[in-house]
Amino acid sequence: MTSEMIARTDAWIAHQPGYVSRQDAVRHCVDLILGQPTHERGLGSPSGVMGQDTAGSDAVD
């Protein structure tokens, strides 16, 4: 993930009720793309989806 993607993920997490790990946030996004409703697991709403991003040269492993 790029540093921008991490920052955007952290910003989304900050708006969620309770604790959400980065791993859970990424799972949430993947579930939304693949069509599994994550609201059943208590993570955010589809309206809070992070926008698309492109990979940059500042990738973080």
Image (cartoon, helix red, strand yellow):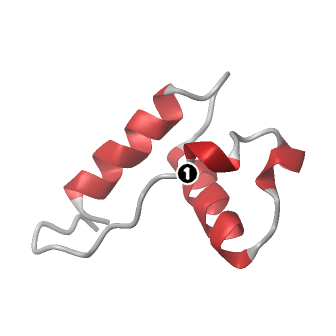
Q: Quadrant of the image for the C terminus?
A: bottom left
Q: Is residue 14 left or right of residue 55?
A: right
Which one is nearer the viewer's eye here, 41 or 48?
48
Residue in view at x 42 percent, y 58 percent = 51
What quarter of the picture does the N terminus occupy? Answer: bottom left
> In the image, is 14 to the left or to the right of 43?
left
**Rendered residue at 77%/73% (across/down):** 35
Q: Which residue is mark 1?
A: 49
Q: Position of residue 39 (x, y in %)?
A: 81, 46
Residue lying at the far front of the rendered structure: 47
Task: Choose between 49 and 21: the one closer to the eye.
Answer: 49
Relative to 27, does residue 35 appear above or below in the rendering?
below
- Figure disc tally: 1
Q: Is residue 55 above or below residue 25?
A: below
Mark 1, residues whose alpha carbon is within 10 Å: few (<14), some, or many (≥20)? some
Q: Nearer the viewer, residue 55 or 1?
A: 55
In the image, residue 31 lies at what x, y percent? Answer: 71, 67
**SS for tag 1?**
loop
Instruction: Name which residue lies at 57% across and 43% down.
Output: 48
Q: Amino acid at mark 1?
A: Val
Among the 4 quarters of the image, the one containing residue 17: top right
Q: Residue placed at 33% from the left, 51% from the top?
A: 6
Left or right relative to 24: residue 6: left
- Give the x, y percent position of residue 12: 47, 38
Q: Which residue is outermost to the top?
A: 18
Q: Is residue 9 left or right of residue 48?
A: left
Q: Position of residue 40 (x, y in %)?
A: 89, 48
- Image height check: is 52 above or below 55? above
Q: Nearer the viewer, residue 26 or 51?
A: 51
